[in-house]
Amino acid sequence: MDKVYIVLQESNCDGQILIEVTPCADLETAKKTMQDEISTLLTESNKYSGLDLDEIEKEQEDGDCDYTLERNDTSFYLSCNYDDYYEHISIMEKEIVKMG
């Protein structure tokens, strides 16, 4: 069976949830797409522009951070601890079923 990789970006801004879906032909393209979305988020968004993810992780370890950050190769989650904002970007693998 053929596979497709979906990059799913879910954004919550004051309770308004926006979902963006980007299909990709392979995992490497999906990972690059996810990294591009994270880069855009950190440079162009009103809420997260200019954040240093490594600094956030360090502050989380110290227990004094305004953000929650969880990330790995196929998932990225960033939320604001004092406001109703979050970004969740993940990669999902789906099988394409051909009928007939």
Image (cartoon, rainbow, N blue to C red):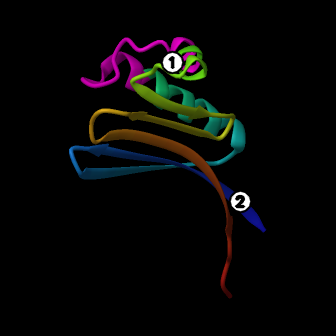
On-image quarter of the N terminus: bottom right
Residue wearing tag 2: 3
Which residue is at the front of the view, 65 or 36? 65
Q: Nearer the viewer, residue 78 or 2?
A: 78
Magenta residues (range): 40-57
Please name whichever residue, 30 or 61, is drawn nearer the observer in this view of the structure: 61
* Residue drawn where x is 33% and y is 17% of the image: 49
What residue is shown with label 1? Answer: 56
| View extreme (front): residue | 63
Q: Position of residue 88 (x, y in %)?
A: 47, 43
Residue 55 lies within the magenta run:
yes
Q: Residues within 10 Å of mark 2 (few under 14, many from 20)?
A: some
Q: Is residue 21 left or right of residue 1?
A: left
Label 1 element class: helix
Q: Position of residue 46 (x, y in %)?
A: 24, 23
**Residue 62: x %, y % from top left:** 57, 17
Question: Residue 47 appears in which quarter of the rendering?
Answer: top left
Q: Amino acid at mark 2?
A: Lys
Looking at the image, is mark 2 or mark 1 nearer the viewer? 1
Q: Quadrant of the C terminus?
A: bottom right
Which residue is at a point 53% across and 22% down the rendered structure image?
A: 63
Is residue 44 shown left or right of residue 9? Answer: left
